[in-house]
Image (cartoon, coloured by chain):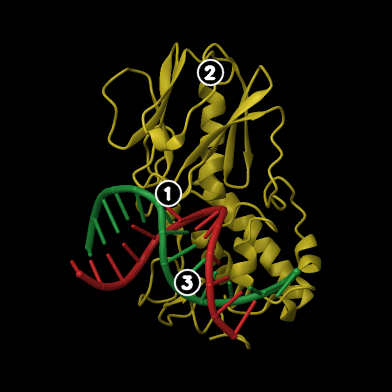
Chain colours: A yellow, B red, C green
Amino acid sequence: MPELPEIETLCRQLRQVIVGAEITAACIIDAKLGTLTDIAGETVSGIRRYGKTLAIELAGNRSLVLHFRMTGRLLWQHTGNGLVPHTRLVVSFPHGRLSLIDPRRFATVTVHKKRTSIPLGRDPLDDGDLSCLEEMAQHCTPPIKTFLMDQHRIAGIGNIYACEILHQARIHPWRGVNTLSPDEWKGIAEATRQTLTRAVACRGTSVSDWRDLFGKQGEYQGHLRVYAREGAGCYRCGEEIIRKKLNGRGTYYCPTCQRSEGGQ
DNA sequence: CCCTATGTTCCCAA
DNA sequence: CTTGGGAACATAGG
């Protein structure tokens, strides 16, 4: 579920709520998550994001590292009501508690020592300069959409935003990366920066499960131009939006706006 | 029963 | 060795 804009939303909201606070207890509800070394008594010193990975940094130079996979999310509650369905982990603070909710149970939680070093590619928001992408692409041939979603190259783009970025840049998802011109790369970099920035401003995309830290839906679903719009008209040219599979993922695009050689 | 789902990793074949 | 595809993970919803 959550891609870069959704994790960034959680990051910003968590900074307002738990930085400087002391963890009073951490309770694993779903044994599949494994066991957490004791973090009770630790103070939260900061929140960081690495692509789609979220790290809650602790003063004792460890961090709680979360990956939400498909359906994971976090919920902050001031009051100690009953657990909402699918709660897998609860971290308690004096002024409220943080729950990890995850119907499909793919999410992971680990405690890392010191500064987490996670082998990920460049962050499209933190490192504004994406000109390195063109260079990386010279030595490989995958379709541009596959390339954008490869977390070791650029970290944070998933299926929804890959589709949206390529529509904005007017590039066909199947286009081989080694066939793109410098101008097209500029367009992709710009579309990436703009799409992700706007999605963050909207607190993410709630097409199904996604909710922010306080249980509220995001608003970017109202701005989607191709994702989940199969058969509907392209807002730019009126053509019907197509959906085909690429690497097993539903891939939405406009066959007119995103026409190009080398594609299906 | 069928298919789909915002992610990642592993296995196997070419 | 590399690349690409599919399955697996587990669950809900249409």
Which three-letter amino acid code belongs to the residue tagged 2? Answer: Asp
Instruction: Establish if A199 lies above or below C4.
Output: above
List x then y, in percent, for residue A188. 67, 67
Which three-letter amino acid code belongs to the residue tagged 3? Answer: Thr
Mark 1 vs mark 3: which is more N-terminal?
A: 1
What's the residue at 56%, 51% (across, down)?
Answer: A198
Identify which residue, A233 or A137, lies in the foreground. Answer: A137
List x then y, in percent, for residue A133. 75, 63
Which three-letter amino acid code belongs to the residue tagged 1? Answer: Glu
Q: Which residue is mark 1?
A: A219
Please check whether the numbered discs 2 and 3 fall on a single chain: yes
Q: Chain of mark 2?
A: A
Q: Which residue is mark 3?
A: A251
Q: Nearer the viewer, mark 1 or mark 3?
A: 3
Instruction: Residue lying at the far bottom in this picture: please name it.
Output: A261
Image quadrant where residue A41 sits: top right
Q: Chain of mark 3?
A: A
Seen in the image, is A232 located left or right of residue A119?
A: left
Q: Which residue is mark 2?
A: A38
What secondary structure is marked by label 1? loop
Q: Nearer the viewer, mark 2 or mark 1?
A: 2
Query: Between marks 2 and 1, how big is the CA–CA gap?
Result: 37 Å
What's the residue at 39%, 41% (across, down)?
Answer: A211
